[in-house]
Every structure is written in structure tokens, then in C-alpha cells.
Image: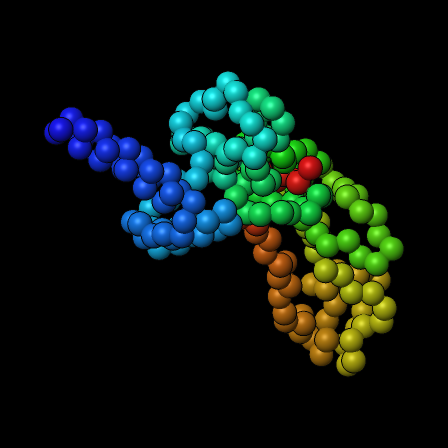
Amino acid sequence: MRSSRLLISALLGVFLLAGGARANGAKGGMTWTAGTVLDASGANTTSPCKTGTIAPATCAVGECFFDTDATVGQNTYGCTSTNTWTLQGDGTGAGALPAGMMAPFNAACPTGWTEVVALQGRLLVGVPSGGTLAGTVGTALTNLQDPTHLHGTGTLASSAPTFTGSALSGGTRKGGTTNPASIIENGAVPAGTVSAPAISGSTAAVSSTMPYIQYRWCSKD
């Protein structure tokens, strides 16, 4: 008799579970409506995707996989065809970005981006109206290069000052000379001095670039 009761209870439990799967209900913060909606917004945690460090060898279309040790932004994969996982998004976690967009990175270009080699060692300048897009001028800098320039120093040729022409007012011109010491005005040698300008300078190399920092520029594929 007891065995019969246990059997009936077990069968009743199976029946209730089967019926519950088809009915509306709620449990653990989740609610469901028979055959239509599963609402997990009230659950403490949700895990809709398989997780791990290696994607399963097989999958059916619509499944998802979260790679726990992948680079941030390159974690989520979707099964796009039988046994084929495809990285979702653009691989940066930034959402959809237009092709050709450029951005600096402090590392290698991520998946879906290509390095802009023409920008290595160069500054970016907006192209003017009708200008040449991606045109370059000058020689690109090498790694951490600090260009310098020099200013050479010259010499100033000097000679004794001379006077030409007639004697000064009230004096006499002596022997036709142009030497100021030989020109007498009113019986006295004109007083005065002539000084040459001083010249100073340096031949040391001087930096001719602005401070800069190097990053890798990449373009969205």
C-alpha cells in the first residue's frame, strides 16, 4: 500500500512539473508566460551565453559564446552557421564605427583596424578646400627624433675711418690726405673716437621641434 502511495506521488509530481512548464509562473526573480515570454530582468544574475576560454567545437545558429580571457571588446561570438562562431561588433566594444575612421591606439591596431603607415612620424593637418587628401609635405620624423638647427657666426670687417673733401670750416687741409689726424681745424686736430660694434653668438645646436608623444594611428576597415 505504501509503495502504491509513493508511486502515485511520483507520478503526480511528474504531471505537475510537466504542466508547470506550459503554464505561467515566476521563480528566482524570473517570470514566464507560456509559449511566449521569458523575463529575466528581475533575476540577480543572468548568463545567456556559454562561457569559457575556447569556443565549443559545435554550435547551432543563434547560440552565443563569451570568451572570458579575450581582449576587452572581442569577447562575444555568435553562431552564424552550423559550427561557425563569428565575433560580434567591431572588436573594440565601441559599437558600429564608419569605415575609414582613424583613431590613436597605445598598442597594436585591434581586429578590424589597419595601421595608417603614412602617418608615422607626421602631424595631422586638416585638408583645405580643394586640397590634396592625405597629401604629405617634408620628411617624416624617425623614432623619438628631435630635429636641431645651427646658426653660424660671421666676422665684421673694419678699417680706420677716413674723411674726404675739403678741410673743415676755419681750418686747412694738409697735403690732400684723408687721414683725420692730418686735418686741422682752427689749429687743432678734431677730437673723436670710432668704435666697432661687438659681435657675439653660439654654434651650439638648438632644438627646432615642439614637444610630442607617439601613438599608433589606425583606420577602421
Task: Choose top left, top right, bottom left or bottom right for residue 1.
Answer: top left
Please indicate, yes or no, whether residue 114 appears anywhere in the rendered image: yes
Query: In the current view of this chain or complex, which residue is farthest to the top?
Result: 57
What is the quadrant of residue 86 in the picture?
top right
Q: How is the image coloured?
A: rainbow
Q: Residue furthest left?
A: 2
Q: Nearer the viewer, residue 163 or 133?
A: 133
Using the rendered image of the protein, determine whether residue 215 is visible from the camera's viewpoint: no
17 with respect to 197 (left or right): left
Front residue (pair 78, 3): 3
Residue placed farthest to the bottom in the image?
Answer: 170
In the figure, is residue 166 to the left or right of 14? right
Observer-nearest of 161 and 52: 52
Count of numbered circles in the view: 0
In the rendered view, tell whether residue 24 sits above or below residue 137: below
Q: Quadrant of the C terminus?
A: top right
Q: Residue at x 22, y 29 (%)?
A: 7
In x, y percent, where is residue 51?
Answer: 41, 31
Q: Is residue 33 above or below residue 78?
A: below
Left or right side of 47 for 112: right
Residue ID at (46%, 49%)? 34
On the image, the x and y values in percent for residue 137 come to: 76, 43
Left or right for 199, reference 169: left
Position of residue 21 measured from the top left corner of the image (x, y, whole percent): 39, 42
- Identify which residue is drawn at 67% across, 70% down: 189
